Amino acid sequence: MLLMGKSMSAAEMHHRGFVARLTKPAELMATTMKLARELASRSTTAMRASRTLIRNQQYVDELLRVNEVEMDELYERMISDDAKQAIARVFALPTAVVAGACVAQLIDNITYTISFACLPHLFEDMKLASESKIGLVAAMFGVGGVLTSSLSGFISDRLKSRKLPLVVGSVGYAVCGCVLFFSHKLWHLMLYRLLNGMASGLVYPISTAAVGDVYPHKLLGLQMAMLNMFNNAGYMIGPIVGGIVYDHAGVHGVSTVIMVIGSLLSLILGFGIKEPLLIHDNLMEQVEVASELSSEKEKTITEEIEIVESKDIPLWKLVLKWRVLLASIITLSLGTLNSSLDNMLGIHVKDTFKVTSSKAGLLYVLNGGVSILLSMPTGSAVDWIIGRHGEIARGYIQIIGLLLTSGAVFTIGMSDSFATILGVEAWLAASNLLVNIPVMSSFGDFVNSLRLNSMAQCYGIFNSFWSLSSTFAPPIATWLYTRIGFRSTVCGLLSGLCILCACLILGETIWQIRKRI
């Protein structure tokens, strides 16, 4: 029994171990399943976290991409703004205004002279060929110039704007080109030249005044010389372009050229420069008071000491200022001289020396070429002499120039060969510069020295007198040529006119010296 009991006890024990061994895998399985569920749960969480990280990374990448694009756009805008500011600063420079004025006066003279070569042929095609009718059409330019020159300066000074009349005048070139395009009667051509003169009466004086505005503390001889250089370039280019275009495309081609260059000029002046009066105001703000101007400027201020109660002087009072009046008389005389010679010289060399039209054209090419070459050196020399010796030196320069001009004109009148006249033309061009540049700059120097708001009016007066001379001088010179001959007209009247002007300036200079004493 005991063995049996022991045996049962052992069996029981074996059973219990077996059961225990059977239960351990179940627990292990349960535990495994539990762990599997936990792992699955953690895996799901990890996957969710992974998906969240991926979405976050995509979001971050998108943000970075957007920010990069925005930064690129911002950088481009900054660069664009810097470029715009740089361009604006360039357009606000005085040199930009001078460049715009030079282009304006180049185109002004091209539109003035482009019809020189084709107008006689145009009259012949229209069966209007008559010297008196051609002279009438030519005179309309001066009439238009006088009309607008006398008003443009006053209006520009009152409106405090230079760009507006410049753009209007530039559009006027395009309008007169349009009139020429449809011209087939005499009054059409008269209207074309009238509008051309009116446009020139806006562009020429206002562009010159704009240059004076942006150099308020400098002598203007060099700047006026630069304008004179482009003037002469236009005077040379115009007839050549007009003749070539008329031969190939007729009057429609010439008128199209005028319309195109007029439109281009309006864009250049409208968008290519800053308002010159704003530049002038900015420059004046940099100066503390009038007494602190540089010693060089004080030397160049006119010896005519005046107390100016107002900076705005009526036009009639401005004309009566002695310096303005004297410069206007010299301008009228010089314009009369040049207009008369231009009109008579071509006829004289054709009648006397049987010179062809192409050879006669060499006179104008040579005159313009010498003026272009010597304008800048002459302007620099004029500024240096006046800056060193004072305003009174301007009179001496003009007297020397007038005496040399008188000698050149007298020699042309006495010449017995075309070659001699051709050589003297270079002399005449150089001596003309010694008169024209000091006279042109005297208007602006006068306004700047007294700090007047009359720059455009002064140059309007200058252009009015020049236009007046180009209106009445050619027909009178032609009449004198037919009545008393070329030699008497040139050697007597034109040469004597130069001597008279020299005596007038000499008298004014002596009076200024006596005032000093």
Image (cartoon, grey):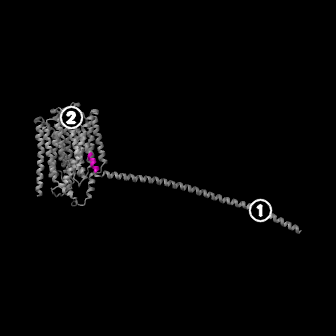
Dot 2 falls on a residue whose secondary structure is helix
Name above or below for residue 196 compared with residue 4: above
Q: Specify start and end residues of the magenta stretch as a single range.
A: 95-102
Residue 126 within the segment the image draws in magenta:
no
Say which quarter of the image contains residue 426.
top left
The residue drawn where x is 23% and y is 54% is 218
- Quarter that holds the C terminus: bottom left
Total of numbered circles in the picture? 2
Name above or below for residue 167 compared with residue 485: below
Q: Is residue 146 left or right of residue 263?
A: left
Dot 1 falls on a residue whose secondary structure is helix
- Quarter that holds the N terminus: bottom right
Cα separation, mark 2 vs mark 1, equals: 134 Å
Q: Position of residue 176 (x, y in %)?
A: 25, 39
Say which quarter of the image contains residue 148.
top left
Question: 10 Å neighbourhood of mark 1: few (<14), some, or many (≥20)?
Answer: few
The residue drawn where x is 79% and y is 62% is 18
Label of residue 21 in the image: 1
- Report the residue that reaches farthest toward the right: 1
Q: Is residue 122 left or right of residue 19?
A: left
In the rendered structure, which amino acid carries the disc numbered 2? Lys
Of pointers 2 and 1, the one earlier in the residue sequence = 1
Q: From the image, tell me which residue sits under label 2.
A: 359
